[in-house]
Amino acid sequence: MEAYVTPVIEFVKANQAWAPAIIFALCFAESLAVLSLIVPAWAMIVAFGPLIGSAGIPFWPILVAAALGATLGDAVSYWFGYVFKDRIATIWPLSKHPDMLPKGHAFFERWGVWAIFIGRFSGPLRAAVPLVAGMLAMSQWKFQIANVLSAFIWAGVLLAPGNFLGKYLPFLH
């Protein structure tokens, strides 16, 4: 995993103007059902917190870019589920994880709209819940409200602690 994380972080250190676009792309990849199974973005997103704190990169534009990327990723996943329904399970790489959709379905049935919030924080369910919401034709409004709110909370939880430590830890020594 370090082989993927280090080059991205080093690039952002050298090209800080690209930080919002890169965090947007990472959060989009982490939230998009198909890409999240392939791209190890979570570690890079968490590593962004200390980076932006220590480099003096403004926090709020990064938070907004991260939340928008996550929102778009889940929205596209919802759309895939809505359009392809049960056929989605036959598409690679989802076909390589046959238990993912049934687990996501059970989780969604149990928690309803709260599954969007809770699932965002659960690695294995993060990809499945928006797909299942689309497959079950959950109300677009309910889904998008939960999607946007949970994306901002998720981005804050992943980025803020590292940002704080990156910004203030040097002063504590």
Image (cartoon, rainbow, N blue to C red):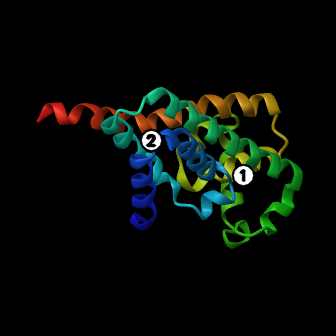
Reply above or below: 88 against 169. below
* x then y, percent, for residue 6: 39, 59
Label 1 neighbour load within 10 Å: few <14, some 14-19, many 20+: many
The residue to which callout 2 is attached is: 16
* x then y, percent, for residue 90: 80, 69
Instruction: Give the residue type at disc 2.
Output: Gln
Question: What secondary structure is found at the residue carrying circle 1?
Answer: helix
Can the viewer see residue 32?
yes
Can the viewer see residue 135?
no
* x then y, percent, for residue 39: 57, 61
Cα separation between marks 2 and 1: 40 Å
Name the side, left or right, on which 26 lies relative to 88.
Answer: left
Instruction: Give the residue type at disc 1.
Output: His
Mark in the foreground, 2 or 1? 2
Name the quarter where the C terminus is drawn.
top left
The residue to which callout 1 is attached is: 105
Q: Nearer the viewer, residue 119 or 37?
A: 37
Q: Quadrant of residue 36?
A: bottom right
Name the quarter where the N terminus is drawn.
bottom left
